[in-house]
Image: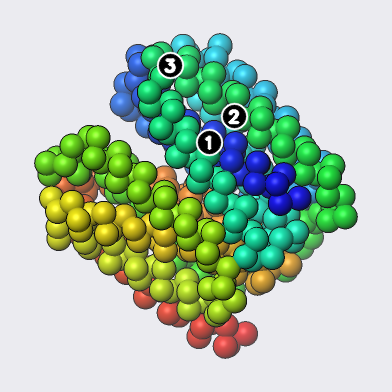
Amino acid sequence: MFWRLSAFYLFYFAAVGVYVIFFPKALQMAGYSSLQIGILLSASPLMRFFAPFLFLRHLKLDDRTFLGALGLMSVAVLLFYPALSTFWTLLGVNLLFGAAMSVTLPFVETRALESLDRKTYGRARLFGSVGFIAIALWLGKVLQSPYDAVVYLSATILTTALLGAAIVFADRAHAHADTPGDGSDFDLLRHWPLWSAFFLMQVSFGGFYNFFTIYETAHGISLETTSWLWSFGVICEIVMFYFQGPLLQRDLHTILKVTIFVTSVRWALLWLFPDSLPVTFAAQSLHALSFALYHTTAITLLHTLYRRKALAQQFFLGISYGLGGFVGAVVAGKIYGPHLFLFESGIALTAFLVLLLEKNVKNRL
């Protein structure tokens, strides 16, 4: 099961790399305006946010639903090619694609946490980072037309679908469903500080994911060096995924607080020393904590808090990477300037302060 999950993560996050890094450029090459590109790329994260609500009462996330999502994802990615030249058709395809993706990763994350121990999970998950950086380095050299991005996205998604199906059929021992009931066993408000922190944490990443390259090159760091800064952060992430096992045996709430506070420090460093290459590399090294350790701690903590574990993973992705990513991109666009990362540091610090209330909430229950 370890190698099936590792292969799934490898190709899934390679596909994410194509979609996040190169699809915006492909849309620009296809003649879309900045506003149209923004609308098209907002469709997927918004579907990630809305889709989990359907599973509270009306749907169940089981093997059959997962396989259906893999099929929908495969059909949607094949429709990108004929839809590329028509805005409204492409928007519809992006909505279908986002809906399928909102189911796929939470199901596999839940299966991985059930099948692997915490140490082994990190070592499987690091293959996702390998896939992401590999496709970034390769496609950056060979991308010549918007259809090149569609071809690579199709290849990685179809391979991901096959590997996802292999996980289901090879691990029938863990087959079960997150069944919808009256919703009493899944209450977002019970842990509202935790969910608020997840949301704010991802909002703080809006400046980094959308403007880091622009910000650094505007302060005299070359585009090539900036690409190495991106790669260095992912390498640090891979190292953390490999060695994080012992850390996850400690109190997960404390680790989550530390990773969020470190993220605030990371953004502050980028604000204070925007033209210092050593400091910027040091800030990028913190990606090991602010992404890798944070992500694993968050999904592991949710796995212990909720009975409907796959639904918890869906809401984590929907509220953080979906709604938080959408709001973060809009906010970063509004506040972009020399003080961008000061604001982002403040948002991450707010997430840390809100999370301090989580223990009090728990103690009253």
Q: Position of residue 200 (x, y in %)?
A: 40, 61
Neighbour class for label 3 at 10 Å: few (<14), some, many (≥20)? Answer: many
Residue drawn at (71%, 51%) of the image: 2
Residue that numbered label 2 is attached to: 156
Residue that numbered label 1 is attached to: 14
Name which of mark 3 and mark 2 comes first in the sequence: 3
Residue 146 tag number: 3
Which of the two discs, 1 and 3, sits closer to the camera?
A: 1
Residue drawn at (75%, 59%) of the image: 115
Q: Residue 260 sits in which quadrant?
A: bottom left
Q: Residue 221 sits in which quadrant?
A: top left
Query: In the picture provided, is 11 more to the left or to the right than 142?
Result: right
Separation of marks 3 and 2 at Cα, in angstroms: 16 Å
Query: In the picture provided, is 174 more to the left or to the right than 113?
Result: right
Q: Is residue 258 above or below residue 91?
A: below
Badge 3 marks a residue whose secondary structure is helix
Q: Amino acid at mark 1?
A: Ala
Q: Amino acid at mark 3?
A: Pro
Is 36 or 289 nearer to us in this picture? Answer: 289
Badge 1 marks a residue whose secondary structure is helix
Is 224 or 32 nearer to us in this picture? Answer: 224
The single residue placed furthest to the bottom in the displayed view is 363
Q: Position of residue 220 (x, y in %)?
A: 11, 41
Q: Is residue 192 above or below residue 168?
A: below
Residue 333 tag number: none
